[in-house]
Amino acid sequence: MAAARGSSVQAFMLEAIAEVTERVKRRRDFEAEARRRWKKMLRTGEYLTLEDVRSCALALARGEQPA
C-alpha cells in the first residue's frame, strides 16, 4: 500500500498512526463534551427537543436568525 501511494513503509506507518491518533483524540474530546453537557442538563434541567433543533435548522436554511 505504501508503494501504491508513492511513499516508504515508514512514512505510511507514521501517517496511519497520526490518523488514528487524531481520530482517538476527536472521539475523546467529543465524549468529554457530551459528559459536560449531560451534567449541565442534569444541573439546570434545560435541554432542546428534536423539534426545537429541527425548527432552528429550518429557520437557518431559510436565512433567518432564530432565537
Image: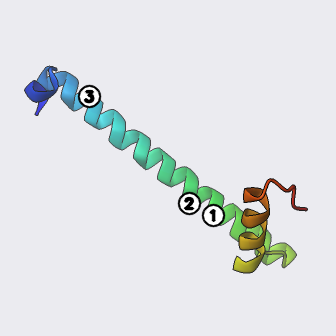
The answer to whether residue 49 is above or below residue 56 is below
- Image point 21% across, 22% down: which residue? 11
Q: Which residue is mark 1?
A: 34
Q: Position of residue 14 (x, y in %)?
A: 26, 28
The answer to whether residue 8 is above or below residue 54 is above
The earlier-in-sequence mark between 1 and 3 is: 3
Q: Which residue is mark 2?
A: 31
Query: Can residue 49 be seen in this snapshot?
Result: no
Q: Position of residue 7 (x, y in %)?
A: 16, 20
Label 1 secondary element:
helix
Q: Position of residue 23 (x, y in %)?
A: 41, 46
Number of residues whose C-alpha sits closer than 10 Å to that of mark 3, classed few (under 14), some (14–19) or many (20 or more): few
- Image point 29% across, 36% down: which residue? 17
The answer to whether residue 47 is above or below residue 3 is below
Q: Mark 2 to mark 1: distance in Å?
A: 5 Å
Q: Which residue is mark 3?
A: 14
